[in-house]
Image (tube, helix red, strand yellow):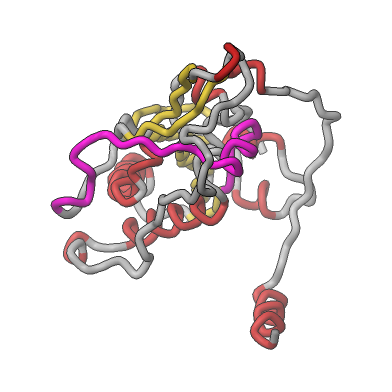
Amino acid sequence: MEGGVHIMSRRMVRPAAEHAGELPDHETVHHLTPLDLQTITVDYVQKGVVLPKPPGGGEHVVEHLVSSFARALARFHPLAGRLAVAETPSPGGVPTISISLRCNGEGAEFVHAVAPGVTVADIADSLYVPRVVWSFFPLNGMLGTDAAVESRPVLAAQVTELADGMFVAMSLNHGVADGFTFWHMFRTWSEISRRSDDSADIELSTPPPVFDRWFVDGIPMPIPLPFAKLEDMVRRPVYTPVEECFLHFSAESEGRAVALLLLD
């Protein structure tokens, strides 16, 4: 394994609707629930997949992934929004703030990178996760609250071309959505990307997402937080560096696990 990761381009991708009425005609606001607010101070959800190098590769494939990402984002248009912080009035003059998701369609970040000295085997055959893998993820090291302080995207994708494959990754603000929504978006992007132009009008097998949030009766919306400013609610602990390991599961072992689950 030689060299590192080189960023070729960064762009902001806005939702691209395939059908009329797929996108709202005005900005909406989603207030965060208590559970959302508990997870907004942690790192972004980050996952990625290693894929074989497609025929032709290069810029053509990246542009195709950008286009399909924009169409998937139309279904998940709140993830193209931005977090907003507001001072909220409170009895007794105690300073409070609130955090909401403004669904304004500003877009999600898309990064194209290359790592010509890294092979699929360098990643998959290693017991420990190579340090270079961290560079395959966008918005790496950001906490959920950083997106509100700096008006950064709540969702980002990165396509890294390897010597003999591709690494496709996403990062999602945990205060905006959970791991289920993360993989729901990933599967939708994948399905749209695999379709040909002739099948664009065919209904996706992946169901549309649901972004409605539930609040207990009587809870004020937005929920006031007892802080004078957003930075006061964030803790940035320094962790002791550790080695992370890969866990490999064969198709047979996965099949047995699924069979056991079905028995229950």
> In this orientation, which residue lies closer to the viewer: 69 or 154?
154
Q: Residue 188 location in percent, x, y?
A: 39, 58
Q: Residue 220 location in percent, x, y?
A: 50, 35
Q: Quadrant of residue 198?
A: bottom left
> Does the rendering let one see residue 42?
yes
Residue 33 magenta-drawn? yes
Q: Quadrant of the N terminus?
A: top right
Picture residue at 38% right of the left edge, 65% below the top: 206
Q: Residue furthest bottom?
A: 263
Q: Residue 40 location in percent, x, y?
A: 59, 34
Q: Which residues are magenta?
A: 20-47
Picture residue at 19% right of the left edge, 53% below the top: 18
Vertical placement of residue 130 versus 247, above or below? above
Picture residue at 55% right of the left edge, 53% below the top: 50
Q: Residue furthest front?
A: 92
Q: Residue furthest left?
A: 20
Picture residue at 79% right of the left edge, 51% below the top: 127
Vertical placement of residue 52 versus 33, above or below? below
